């Protein structure tokens, strides 16, 4: 059995604070604080930075938490081996994912995961920031990137094809570009930080410099601007495939697309014996997106209809 104060510390980190962990363990916040201070005194190290806004682990706290999570997983596995019980996926699982992608391609299917693993306490955080797994106390991050991050365990889930597109109304009003240089005379749309566009064409990489016609920090706003006919955007197929299929937007300059280095990844911290719930969720996503993700299938069907 693990030291009760160690279990208390793991609960504080998993729940994100003393009050939430106290509710889970049925312990008052005052007693939680007293026992955490007792553990820190015993170890001779500060484990948690206490602020009014959020809980943050010290480097010592991060190391202890990673070690304790591994120990808990090993204890759980040892009990299953002794009892002969099959592995049961259970416990808290915190996922962080990009807002639009999660809304469109994770949330509609979550009931399947919950029904298959009813003992998992699932928590989904949505953010377009590059979430720090330690700071956000996340077990798993879904990232759309060319670089999942140093020191991480990353599994590639799907490609992320990005195409240039515009609404028919915009193309009728402003004309359709026939070559990359034509883009200089068009209204380009991108969220802050998304330009320059790095494309790959028949002659190799191409960089499109410019400034968004309308400035915004929201990729979802860029999508709506594109659908409304405000300009040309570089959009991921997962985001725009339905609009392509129903004619709300058209692909332009189809011989140029975003770099294929960018892909969809499931990212986790390296740790011994990670919780079974992490592996189960990654397997769940693999089942959704492989061998061909749904947004790629709809694009393939559209191409076949146009031939």
Image: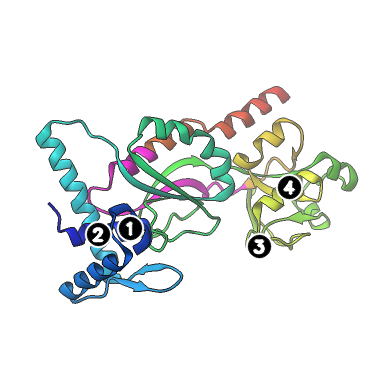
Which quadrant would residue 210 be assigned to in this image? bottom right
Mark 3 Cα shell of 10 Å, populated few (<14), some (14-19), many (≥20): some
Q: Secondary structure at mark 3?
A: loop
Point out the frontmost of discs 1 and 4: 1
Mark 2 Cα shell of 10 Å, populated few (<14), some (14-19), many (≥20): many
Q: Secondary structure at mark 2?
A: helix
Q: Secondary structure at mark 1?
A: helix
Tell me what residue is drawn at x 41 percent, y 34 percent.
113
C-alpha span from label 2 to label 1: 8 Å
Q: Which residues are magenta?
A: 258-281
Position of 206 with respect to 46 (left or right) is: right
- Which mark identifies residue 21? 1
C-alpha span from label 1 to label 4: 41 Å
Mark 4 Cα shell of 10 Å, populated few (<14), some (14-19), many (≥20): few
Tell me what residue is drawn at x 71 percent, y 36 percent.
243
Residue named by callout 4: 224
Residue toward you, 294 or 23: 23
Of pointers 2 and 4, the one earlier in the residue sequence = 2
Count the marks: how many? 4
Point out the frontmost of discs 2 and 3: 2
Relative to 285, is 67 above or below? Answer: below
Label 3 near label 2: C-beta < 8 Å? no
Residue named by callout 2: 8
């Amino acid at each position: 059995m693990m030291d009760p104060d160690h279990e208390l510390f793991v609960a504080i980190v998993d729940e994100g604070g003393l009050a939430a962990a106290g509710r889970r363990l049925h312990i008052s916040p005052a007693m939680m604080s007293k026992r955490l201070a007792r553990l820190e005194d015993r170890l001779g190290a500060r484990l948690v930075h206490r602020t009014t806004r959020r809980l943050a682990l010290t480097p010592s706290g991060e190391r202890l938490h990673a070690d304790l999570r591994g120990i808990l997983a090993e204890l759980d596995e040892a009990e299953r081996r002794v009892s002969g019980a099959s592995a049961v996926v259970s416990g808290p699982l915190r996922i962080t994912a990009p807002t639009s992608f999660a809304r469109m391609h994770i949330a509609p299917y979550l009931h399947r995961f919950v029904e298959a693993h009813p003992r998992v306490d699932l928590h989904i955080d949505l953010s377009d920031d590059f979430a720090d797994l330690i700071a956000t106390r996340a077990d798993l991050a879904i990232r759309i990137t060319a670089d999942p991050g140093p020191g991480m365990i990353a599994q590639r889930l799907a490609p992320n094809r990005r195409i240039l597109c515009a609404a028919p109304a915009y193309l009728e009003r402003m004309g359709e570009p026939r070559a990359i240089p034509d883009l200089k005379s068009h209204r380009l749309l991108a969220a802050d930080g998304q330009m320059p566009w790095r494309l790959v064409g028949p002659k190799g990489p191409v960089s499109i410099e410019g400034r968004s016609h309308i400035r915004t920090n929201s990729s979802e706003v860029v999508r709506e601007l594109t659908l409304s006919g405000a300009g040309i955007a570089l959009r991921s197929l997962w985001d725009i495939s339905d609009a392509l299929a129903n004619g709300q937007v058209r692909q332009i300059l189809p011989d140029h697309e975003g770099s294929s280095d960018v892909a969809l990844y499931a990212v986790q911290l390296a740790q011994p014996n990670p919780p079974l719930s992490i592996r189960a969720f990654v397997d769940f996503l693999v089942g959704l997106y492989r061998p061909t993700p749904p947004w790629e299938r709809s694009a393939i069907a559209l191409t076949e209809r146009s031939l």
